[in-house]
Image (cartoon, helix red, strand yellow):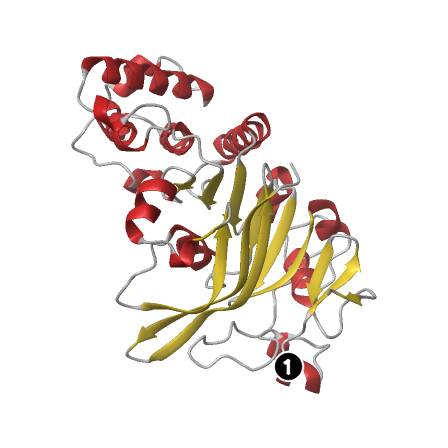
């Protein structure tokens, strides 16, 4: 459980557009351990999806530019791995992806079974490529698919595989996506807001399922979400991002009970509560084409000083395993070496 699985250091990603160069990720650091469920939270446009796509190596080639940084996964730097190795050995095998909207992930003109079996033809962790197209291979693949559909609590998997995507519910489609992600026995699953399109009851079932599968199979999960309630239910640790910078990282209990960054505090204050009125965050998210220097949150922070306006804070410890980037945190800190 304590082995470091992925380590991201000083990752900087820019997007080129007619309006200029947007600095979408600005020196992001993040590390995860085997079996850990990490929440990645923040407002829209903070860089959560860009970070996930950078890990997978699927940033748009015509617009995205990786300025600096490393992404080490099981000892290999993914940013310098040849595309054929990244596609053949990592993407879809060791690192799997669960999209936000399962309704767009399936081809509507093919049955669910055809599409899942096509995935397993080329990404199976168990069978040799020389067996492609053989009857024995197909039977083994079919049995494996049915096993995983039962694992994600889909009844009558034989019937489900014969259906077209529009013939199953949104919750069932999301369970299918989870099963497809786990079929290849990945070490890391990136779940990009997988419960956004689901009703509350189904959302709770999906969160419980993800947590159980991570625990039982030792799979690490990077869970990007706007929903702090969902993050509380499923995550071991939470990383907060703001305008392309990570600003705080903490175990889930410390995050909700003792937030240290002013932005984190304001995020939590904006949650609906019967005890107080909902409070928004004053000001606007900065334009990433011309972001403010130093801490990007300083234009919206009443604690900002000259240092905040000129120098990005270094990571500091407010308590063991709780890191914040802030010149004026809500708790006493010590500098991280």
The residue identified by callout 1 is 311
Please state the horizontal and vertical placement of residue 36, each as a whole percent of the image: 60, 40
Please state the horizontal and vertical placement of residue 27, each as a whole percent of the image: 54, 69
Horizontal placement of 327 versus 126: left or right? Answer: right
Which corner quadrant holds the N terminus? top right
Q: Secondary structure at mark 1?
A: loop
Please state the horizontal and vertical placement of residue 152, each as a whole percent of the image: 45, 23
Instruction: Locate residue 119: give its quadrant.
Output: top left
Horizontal placement of 190 versus 228: left or right? Answer: left
Which residue is at a point 60% across and 58% down the rendered structure image? 240
Horizontal placement of 163 versus 299: left or right? Answer: left
Which corner quadrant holds the C terminus? bottom right
Instruction: Locate residue 292: give its quadrant.
Output: bottom right
Query: 103 or 81, which is in the foreground?
Result: 81
Q: Is residue 120 above or below residue 304?
A: above
Q: Is residue 88 above or below residue 294?
A: above
Please state the horizontal and vertical placement of residue 213, each as a whole percent of the image: 53, 28
How packed mark 1 is, by other alpha carbons closer than 10 Å (few <14, some 14-19, many 20 or more), is: few
Number of numbered markers: 1
Which residue is at a point 56% across and 30% down the rendered structure image? 208
């Amino acid at each position: 459980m304590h082995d470091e699985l992925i380590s991201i250091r000083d990752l900087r990603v820019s997007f080129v557009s007619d309006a200029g160069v947007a600095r979408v990720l600005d020196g992001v650091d993040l590390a995860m351990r085997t079996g850990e469920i990490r929440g990645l939270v923040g407002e829209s446009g903070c860089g959560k999806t860009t970070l996930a796509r950078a890990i997978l190596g699927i940033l748009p080639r015509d617009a995205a530019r990786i300025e600096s940084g490393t992404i080490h996964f099981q000892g290999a730097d993914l940013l310098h791995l040849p595309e054929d190795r990244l596609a053949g050995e990592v993407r879809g095998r060791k690192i799997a992806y669960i999209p936000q909207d399962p309704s767009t992930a399936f081809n509507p003109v093919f049955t669910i079974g055809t599409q899942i079996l096509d995935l397993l033809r080329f990404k199976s962790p168990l069978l040799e490529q020389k067996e492609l197209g053989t009857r024995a291979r197909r039977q083994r693949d079919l049995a494996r698919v049915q096993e995983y559909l039962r694992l994600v609590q889909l009844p009558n998997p034989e019937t489900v595989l014969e259906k077209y995507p529009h013939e199953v519910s949104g919750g069932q489609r999301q369970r299918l996506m989870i099963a497809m992600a786990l079929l290849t026995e990945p070490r890391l699953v990136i779940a990009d807001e997988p419960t956004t399109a689901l009703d509350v009851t189904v959302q709770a079932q999906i969160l419980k399922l993800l947590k159980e599968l991570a625990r039982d199979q030792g799979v690490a999960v990077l869970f990007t979400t706007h929903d702090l309630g969902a993050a509380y239910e499923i995550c071991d640790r939470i990383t907060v991002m703001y305008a392309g910078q990570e600003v705080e990282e903490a175990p889930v209990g410390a995050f909700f009970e003792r937030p240290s960054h002013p932005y984190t505090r304001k995020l939590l204050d904006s949650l609906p509560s019967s005890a107080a009125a909902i409070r928004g965050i004053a000001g606007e998210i900065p334009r990433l084409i011309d972001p403010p220097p130093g801490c990007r949150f300083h234009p919206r922070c009443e604690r900002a000083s000259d240092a905040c306006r000129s120098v990005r804070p270094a990571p500091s410890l407010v308590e063991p395993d709780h890191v914040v980037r802030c010149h004026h945190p809500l708790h006493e800190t010590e500098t991280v070496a």
